[in-house]
Amino acid sequence: MKLSELSLDKSLYLFELDDVLFSKREYLLQVYYLFGSFYEFTEGSVKASEMAGFMKKVYDHHGETAVFPAIQTLYGIDSKYEDNFNRLIANAQIPLRLLIPHPVTELLLRLVEGQKQIAILTKGNPVEQLNKLRFIEWGESDKVKESLKVYFVDELEFKSFNPIDYIAEEYRLPKDQILIINEIIEN
């Protein structure tokens, strides 16, 4: 969705977290460095920066799911470390804040000024998604987070709810008054 083409005629705007409110890549690169540091400290066989650099290349060229198998093959990492890796992705205490892109901040402020309702509807592990929220640097849009509700697609579907139907009922809105922003296309 191009932000410049977004109409502000809806009542509720649902934002995805990853690659909308912040760069998922930036989050994962920090996690990769943390895992590399953990592995270097534990095993001492590879430098954290070397492993993190390799993980970044794998992520950029083959995607997130290819990262652990690639480091396991290249560095001979025991499969027992996969649980540590996955726990770290979900619960990492990342060193740098996740920045909301300026155009998204401007959109959030326009929505607040227009007295529109804003919430988050996100896919993925709820623990991981909540953890990411803790590290968002809201900046100018800080007032948005005060009344922000968060909904988890996976959790709602697990409970046999259609996420949009559920949210529409909770906000007492017709579904055509809800806009989902789950992708941003650069202008």
Image (cartoon, rainbow, N blue to C red):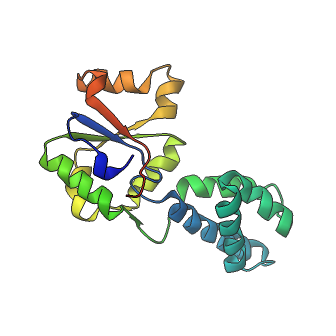
Q: Residue at x 36, y 62 (%)?
A: 101
Residue 91 in the figure: left or right of residue 122: right
Count of picture labels:
0
Q: Residue 71 location in percent, x, y?
A: 78, 64
At 21% from the left edge and 41% from the top edge, which residue is drawn?
A: 8
Residue 10 in which image quadrant: top left
Q: Nearer the viewer, residue 44 or 149?
A: 149
- Residue at image coords 38%, 26%: 164
Q: Residue at x 41, y 58 (%)?
A: 186
Q: Position of residue 112 (x, y in %)?
A: 17, 48
Left or right of 75, for residue 2? left
In this view of the protein, which residue sits in the foreground, 84 or 6? Answer: 6
130 shown above or below 72:
above
Measured as percent of width and height from the top left, residue 187 is found at 37, 58
- Quadrant housing residue 100: bottom left
In the depicted structure, whether residue 45 falls above or below residue 103: below
**Residue 182 found in image quarter:** top left
Left or right relative to 93: residue 105:
left
Between 183 and 41, the one nearer to me in the picture = 183
Looking at the image, residue 177 lies above or below residue 20: above
From this view, report whether residue 24 is shown above or below residue 163.
Answer: below
The answer to which of 138 and 101 lies nearer the viewer is 101
| Image coords of residue 161 (percent x, y) | 45, 21
